[in-house]
Image (cartoon, coloured by chain):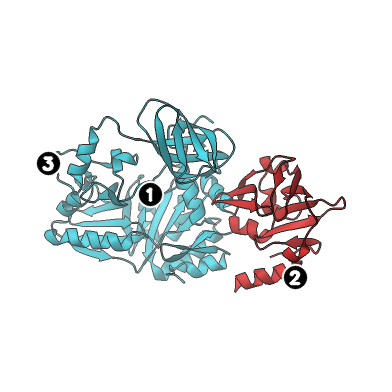
Amino acid sequence: MSELPGDLLFTNDHEWLRREADGSVTIGITDHAATALGDLVYVELPEVDQDVDAGGEMAVVESVKAASDVYAPVAGRVAAVNEDLSDDPEKINADPYGDGWIVRMALADGLDESELMTPDAYQQVLDELDD
Amino acid sequence: MGAKTPYYDKHVEAGARIVDFGGWDMPLHYGSQKEEHHAVRQGAGVFDVSHMTIVDLGGERARDFLRHLVANDVGKLKDYGKALYTCMLNDAGGVIDDLIIYYLSDTRYRMVVNAATREKDLAWIREQAKAFDVEVVERSELAMIAVQGPRARALAAPCIDAEYREAALGLKPFYGMEAGEWFVARTGYTGEDGWEIVMPAADAHAVWDRLLAAGVAPCGLGARDTLRLEAAMNLYGSDMDETISPLDAGLAWTVAWEPAERAFVGRSAIEALRNSPDRQRFVGLLLEDKGVLRNHQRVVVDGVGEGEITSGGFSPTIGRSIALARVPAGDYDRVQVDVRGKLLNARIVKTPFVRNGQVRIDV
């Protein structure tokens, strides 16, 4: 498994967040999640400007095998969605932390980093899963 | 930790993602389920199917026994090696399992039944066999692979003992033959040409290595499922089970009603259903909207009623979602499917969706 990018934060649901310069956050699923799902074939994206609660359903990723909800790790308003995934959902498999981003959100409140994991902490979660 | 087939170490070596399947540790895929799927449609792939249960039947009354046990009629089988696909029913006409029977002689047959149903199948078969004095021998010591795809037979032929190779290459579709300790059959579960090959476990590793070296792609249960769905082949436990008759699972063609005096198990129950006017339909669906159809989703037919998807998924060959579904009686071809709370449009299409590498429906 590849090295986790150092500028990301992670959730227990195997999602990642990146803080952007404008204060928004970009959200995707981790390489571990994408690999576990297998080849992705469809992504259901939220509407831009839609309000999302923390823990609420934000997107659905479907692989050849199964559908899986992507939950919003933070509350906010959808600022942008990755439209490219409509035609090419496998971008998530190929580049989960880059071209495979799913949603950009304007935060309702600040980012409570205590709820999120650093790359090192998330790596530990992954290591324990392998045991 | 589940049971392991003779190929287990080879799966691990090939980087398989191992999952539990009916108590067996089996490969789900070796990296990409879609690539494995395409390999079988365009070239050749090999599946480990050793988890399936091989049962040999022997005895003077073996033919009579099978004419009693299953809904299709082994009386049709006259040629050595000819295979028959059939359902084994309970007294209520529900499907205990679907299986293939190979005819070796009037006193000798080989059956291949599903892995997940092994115990109940064997118990049922042995119970039914008592009255016929037929010997029922499970061959769990054997290994079995399916080599499937347009190039499968050409690439697998060198693995077969030279003494039998020509005969194996000459097998017609849906025929099998003994080849020394091996058994080779031109059957499969993908909608492509190919062989299913049974061999002693001692031969398993060498054959696997040879096939992979020849360019045959190792394929997991994931691709096996999308391939069989495109070929519109039923999956036991999804499309039918003990509460569903073969007539409600698109398998009426496997029921031999003639001769009328053949009293196979479940006959009277399904005969009662046979002429019922409001029979459900078992159909193929093509999703016209974006999304993915999945098992158990609700099918809504405007003004008619509701049905259910029995097998749904994404078709890598078509690039759209397809499904098999049980829907209410009636003359219509447009339906909607409740996909995660949204009603999406789908169209009833004539199956199979894909056969021999070609898309067979209007997309």
Rendered colour, chain B: cyan
Judge the density around disc 1: few (<14), some (14-19), many (≥20) Cα neighbours within 10 Å: many
Q: Which mark is residue B261?
A: 3
Image mark 3: chain: B
Q: Residue at x 31, y 66 (%)?
A: B139
Res. B32 visible in picture: yes
SS of the residue under disc 3: loop
Q: Are marks 2 and 1 in contact (CB under 8 Å)?
A: no
Q: Read off the residue under disc 2.
A: A120
Where is residue B239? Give x, y as percent: 38, 46
Q: Report whether A67 appears left or right of A110.
A: left
Q: Nearer the viewer, mark 2 or mark 1?
A: 2
Q: Read off the residue under disc 1.
A: B187
Q: CA distance from mark 3 to mark 2?
A: 73 Å
In front: B174, or B99? B99
Q: Mark 2: which amino acid? A: Asp
Judge the density around disc 2: few (<14), some (14-19), many (≥20) Cα neighbours within 10 Å: few
Q: Nearer the viewer, mark 1 or mark 3?
A: 3
Image mark 2: chain: A
Q: Report whether B52 appears left or right of A81.
A: left
Q: Residue at x 73, y 52 (%)?
A: A75
Q: Mark 1: which amino acid? A: Thr
Judge the density around disc 3: few (<14), some (14-19), many (≥20) Cα neighbours within 10 Å: few
Image mark 1: chain: B
Q: Report whether B134 appears left or right of B318.
A: left
SS of the residue under disc 2: helix
